[in-house]
Image (cartoon, rainbow, N blue to C red):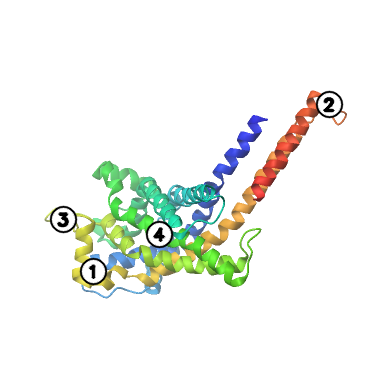
Amino acid sequence: MSSKGSSGGVAKMAEPFVCGGSAATFASIVIHPMDLAKVRMQLFGQLNPGKPVPGFGSILSSMVKNDGIASIYKGVDAAIGRQMVYGTARIGLHRAFSDKLKQMNDGKPISFAMKTLSGMASGSIAVCIGTPFDIALVRLQSDSMAAPAERKNYKNVFDALTRTVSEEGGGALYKGLAPNILRGMSMNVGMLACYDQAKETVAKLLGDPMTNGPALTTQIGASCVAGFTAALFSMPFDLIKSRLMAQKADPTMGKMPYSGVADCAVQIMKKDGPVGFFSGFSAYYGRCAPHAMIILLSIESITKGYRSTSLTLSTEKNRAMVPSPLTKTGSPVASDLQAAEGANRSMGMSYSA
């Protein structure tokens, strides 16, 4: 009896992490070419000072022409690894924190300030866990932009991770951690906190009671808002993060281009002005908006499937306790069966809530 209750509790506790991580990984695979183009647009100004940044389409078409169609999925293994760690943590923690805050608020919807706090906390924690994969991803995506003599020619994500540690030390896996934390916090606020708030607003405008979850129209409207705010809030920090993670020491002077977050921000401001922080915004928005929408739309379906599967498995487990259809009422076995069916009914109620 207690083991069944505990297994149901574990399934419920794991739900936001399993569903959030699955949705984030799926979305990352779909939009990987756009993410690759975004990184290259951001680094182009650093590697080719004074030259105009090529457009989103021209970067991808040039890659396909020169290196084949497989080139636009360079580093996808690192992207998957990153989302399995970072995406799982940031979405799962935000849902767990939000649910706890809602519970503390007597089940009533929490304020946008509390949603923002949840997004910032979960985003910063997730970044600290997933930054090594982020480093590997940026390096895999930017390596072919370097001069042939300076390329590392990483084989895969694990090769990038191990070689980075052996050549530069373990600390190199956390290069750019500060801007990455700021990016993770702003991304979570822009995507998850704004989605939760927009969902309530759009539902009111459309007259959606959300008794069995938000309607598809509510989800689409809220996810469109969240896609834009996620890109707008996080773009400056993402630019700084990409440049710090991809920087290499000058071969003659041995000096890094940037000494830290503030120095990188100052140099961008001096060279390009405020608009420089939004260099490559078209590709970034083209990456963020679909990514956010895919996650936020698919997570609802994944969650329903997860709950249905968990409930089915629990039902089969409880029914397996029946040794014979001739079991008499009042016997120990019948009592166990009645208790199991009661546990299953209570679990079904908790999952449908």
Which is nearer the eye, 239 or 80?
239
Q: CA distance from mark 2 to mark 3?
A: 83 Å
Q: Whole-percent x and y of residue 73?
A: 43, 60
Q: Which residue is mark 3?
A: 251
Q: Please rate how many residues cluster around mark 3, counting C-alpha atoms within 10 Å: few if below 14, some from 14 to 19, many from 20.
A: few
Q: Which residue is mark 2?
A: 330
Q: Which mark is residue 48?
A: 1
What amino acid does circle 1 point to?
A: Asn
Q: CA distance from mark 1 to mark 4?
A: 28 Å
Q: Is residue 101 above or below residue 213?
A: above
What amino acid does circle 2 point to?
A: Gly
The reply to whether the C-beta atoms of the residues labelled 2 and 1 are less than 8 Å apart is no
Q: Which mark is residue 328?
A: none
The reply to whether the C-beta atoms of the residues labelled 2 and 4 are less than 8 Å apart is no
SS at mark 4?
A: helix
Front disc: 4 or 3 = 4
Q: Say which residue appears at 46% left-offset and 56% top-offset.
A: 115
> Is residue 83 visible to the viewer in this orientation of the structure?
yes
SS at mark 2?
A: loop
Of the two numbered discs 2 and 4 on the same chain, state the one appearing first in sequence.
4
Of the two numbered discs 2 and 3 on the same chain, state the one appearing first in sequence.
3
Front disc: 1 or 4 = 4
In the image, taking residue 50 as reference, residue 318 lies left or right, namely right
Q: Say which residue appears at 47% left-offset and 65% top-offset.
A: 226
Q: Say which residue appears at 31% left-offset and 64% top-offset.
A: 236
Front disc: 2 or 1 = 2
Q: Which residue is mark 4?
A: 187
In the image, taking residue 22 as reference, residue 267 lies left or right, namely left
Q: CA distance from mark 1 to mark 3?
A: 16 Å
Q: Whole-percent x and y of residue 2?
A: 64, 30
Q: Is residue 321 above or below residue 188?
A: above
Which is nearer the eye, 49 or 127?
127
